[in-house]
Amino acid sequence: MNNFTVVVDACVLYPAPLRSLVMCLTLEGLFRARWTDRIHDEWIRNVIADREDITREQMERVRSLMDQHAPDALVAGYESLIDGLQLPDPDDRHVLAAAIHGRADLILTFNLKDFPSSIISSFGIEAQHPDQFLLNQLSLDESKVLTALKRQRELLKNPPKKSLEFLEILERQQLPLSVAELRRFADVI
């Protein structure tokens, strides 16, 4: 298991294709994913608010499976750090607190403005957009990333997806640069 540690913000865990991507990359050993019960609560609450066809029980099952399959992912004991942190959006302090307490190297988020480098770098933490993160992972270990992506695509069974269809799904998840690069590997994904 790679020791590079990433706290995954709720905005990356919902929608499902990104959550699945994070899990497949984690299971491939590319990095150590971390989150908190509060991060889980946030993405689950948003899924349930947006999707009447999905129940809390279904999402709690997903939560449980994530916690089971990502060793040591659940960060606890970070709460005392929250009040001492300053961020543009005070509601994001719990994510930074979890990253500090969980000894994360990176916060994976779409909300980069909420985690200014001028603040979080003093804790040895960087915030990164999922598109840049996936590109970086690809450059670090192309083989493992492609294996993870193939696994993710093969999990899509209702209906199954061909490689290019799968890449279109990823592109809709705000990963245009990564997908542009991944098109070269469509025959192995």
Image (cartoon, rainbow, N blue to C red):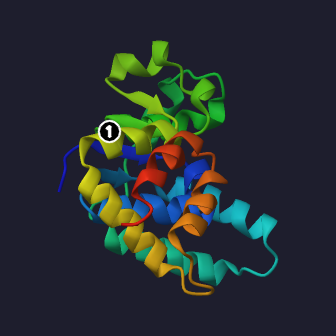
* 82 to 167, vertically: above or below: above
Q: Is residue 29 left or right of residue 182?
A: left
Q: Quadrant of residue 126?
A: top left
- Specify the amino acid type for callout 1: Ala
Q: Is residue 181 left or right of residue 5?
A: right
Label 1 belongs to which residue?
104
SS for callout 1: loop
* 63 to 138, vertically: above or below: below
Across and down, in percent, residue 148 comes to 35, 64
- The residue depicted at 44 percent of the width and 71 percent of the height is 152
- The residue depicted at 49 percent of the width and 59 percent of the height is 37
Across and down, in percent, residue 50 comes to 80, 65
- The residue depicted at 54 percent of the width and 53 percent of the height is 39
- The residue depicted at 55 percent of the width and 86 percent of the height is 157
| Within-10-Å neighbours for mark 1: few <14, some 14–19, many 20+ | many
Camera sees residue 25: yes
